Image (tube, rainbow, N blue to C red):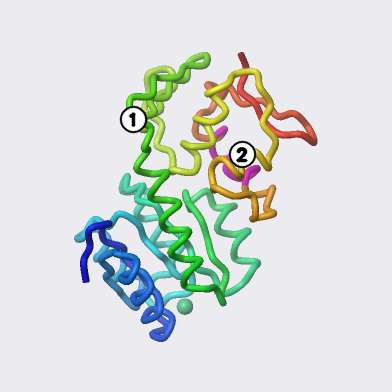
Amino acid sequence: MGDAKGLIVVVEDERAIADLQRLYLSEAGFGVHVEHDGAAGFAAIQRLRPVAIVLDVGLPSMDGIEVCRRLRESGDWTPVIFVTARDDEVDRILGLELGADDYLTKPFSPRELVVRIRTILRRFSGATGNAKQLAVGTVTLDPSERRVEASGRTIMLTSTEFDLLAKLMSSPGQVFTREQLLSTVWGQADYGLGRTVDVHIAQLRSKLGDDSPILTSRGVGYSVRR
Ligand code: CA
């Protein structure tokens, strides 16, 4: 079981699902550590510093939302993929501004999980080389360090939020449709979830506060001001 691609922590109380996740992720070349309840999962994440986390929402002792909230509070922005049992939980997760990078609704194909993890890690690792720093108004974005500052303060963004902002800031004044933003950030526009973009944009605006350069083109999409 090589872990050349990094360690993934899976927190899942349904053993059969956890076993499948472990199998597919390790076959894809990841190291996998599984915990079956929230508190143990949280402790393992802090101890092991994984490259990504697969987090079931309904867990004994501490639910997945609480695990993620505590991680974010502690300044840990490791990519999180939520696994939910119900569609209505998706709205709750996205609405809570926890910095969820993606989510899957049960039942899902373990292959799909592997695809999502790869996509997130590819984005998170940047792969932007020596791309030059972008600046709009008081906001600066450094693609190689994946760092955003607004009026001199560092803004903690999820990888999804970062990539959305980088896309918008790459071409100030240009309006990007939700579909364009989805396909840029998620690789393919097969999610059919325009609201996902809207929620991440709302999170970005809230984090950037008065510094936010993001403009809404009603019914079309988003841009940053020139
Ligand atoms: Ca569960």
> Dot 1 lies on which element?
loop
Reply above or below: 177 against 71: above
Q: Residue at x 60, y 38 (%)?
A: 201
> Residue 203 magenta-drawn?
yes
Q: Amino acid at mark 1?
A: Gly
Q: Left or right of 22: which side holds 101?
A: right
Q: Residue at x 60, y 62 (%)?
A: 90
Q: Residues within 10 Å of mark 2 (few under 14, many from 20)?
A: many
Q: Left or right of 36: which side holds 179?
A: right
Q: Left or right of 218: which side holds 128?
A: left
The residue mark sitting in front, 1 or 2, is 1
Q: Residue at x 68, y 40 (%)?
A: 178
Q: Which residue is mark 2?
A: 181
The boundaries of the magenta stretch are 197-205
Q: Residue at x 35, y 57 (%)?
A: 52
Instruction: Assign the C terminus to one quadrant of the image.
Output: top right
Q: Amino acid at mark 2?
A: Leu
> Dot 2 lies on which element?
helix
Q: Residue 140 in the image: state x and y as whole percent.
A: 43, 20
Front one among 123 and 33: 123
Q: Quadrant of residue 205?
A: top right
**Quick one: label 1 or label 2, which is nearer the N terminus?**
1
Reply above or below: 67 against 38: above
Instruction: Assign the N terminus to one quadrant of the image.
Output: bottom left
Q: Overall secondary structure of the magenta stretch?
A: helix
Mark pair 1, 2: CA separation? 21 Å
Q: Residues within 10 Å of mark 1 (few under 14, many from 20)?
A: few
Q: Residue 207 in the image: state x and y as whole percent.
A: 50, 34
Q: Which residue is mark 1?
A: 129
> Residue 92 magenta-drawn?
no
Report the number of numbered marks.
2
